[in-house]
Image (spheres, rainbow, N blue to C red):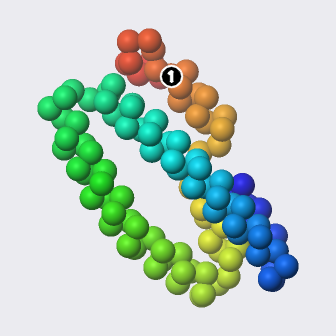
Amino acid sequence: MVLSLLAVHGRAQLWIIYVVAFCYGIAFSILSRAGAGLRKDMLADDELGAANAALQTVGQGLRIVAPLAGAGLYVAVGGSAVAVPTRASLPLPSDAGRADAAFTASGTWSG
């Protein structure tokens, strides 16, 4: 989805940015809820508070730094320099399937 941003070259393609942003918003909304459920299942009750606090600290810090870095990169070298590294940092759907298969029913790593 993020590579569709490479098609944006002017105002006529501005709508592509909004579609990508909308899809990312929905995806991250679903993933954050799934992550909360996984943390609850994976961690002991006494570790859950510290894990949530650490994730919130990192997440809020990145909310400050990431837009500044992305805007600086965009201004320095253009939009494709932002879209391609972003896509490269995301796992492929086939990677997610292999990661799920590597966990056994008891929650231990089998790979």
Furthest-left residue in view? 46
Any part of residue 6 in sight:
no
Picture residue at 65% right of the left edge, 43% below the top: 92
Residue 1 appears left or right of 34:
right
**Where residue 66 sits in the image (x, y, percent)?**
45, 70
Q: Is residue 27 shown to the viewer in this render?
A: yes
Please tell me in which quadrant of the rendered image residue 41 appears.
Answer: top left
The 10 Å Cα crowd at callout 1, few under 14, some 14 to 19, many 20 or more, is few
Residue 2 in the image: state x and y as whole percent: 69, 59
Side of 14 relative to 77 (left or right): right
Element class at badge 1: loop
Q: Which residue is mark 1?
A: 102
Q: Nearer the viewer, residue 79 or 46?
A: 46
Direction from residue 8 to residue 73 in the image, left or right? left
Task: Name which residue lies at 19% across and 29% down.
Answer: 45
Which quarter of the picture shows residue 44?
Answer: top left
In the image, what residue occupies the spot 14% across and 32% down?
46
Quadrant for residue 52, please give it: top left
Up-down relation of residue 74 to residue 27 (above or below)? below
Residue 20 in percent (x, y) is at 69, 61
Residue 105 in picture, x, y percent from top left = 44, 12
Vertical comparison of 31 with 90: above or below? above
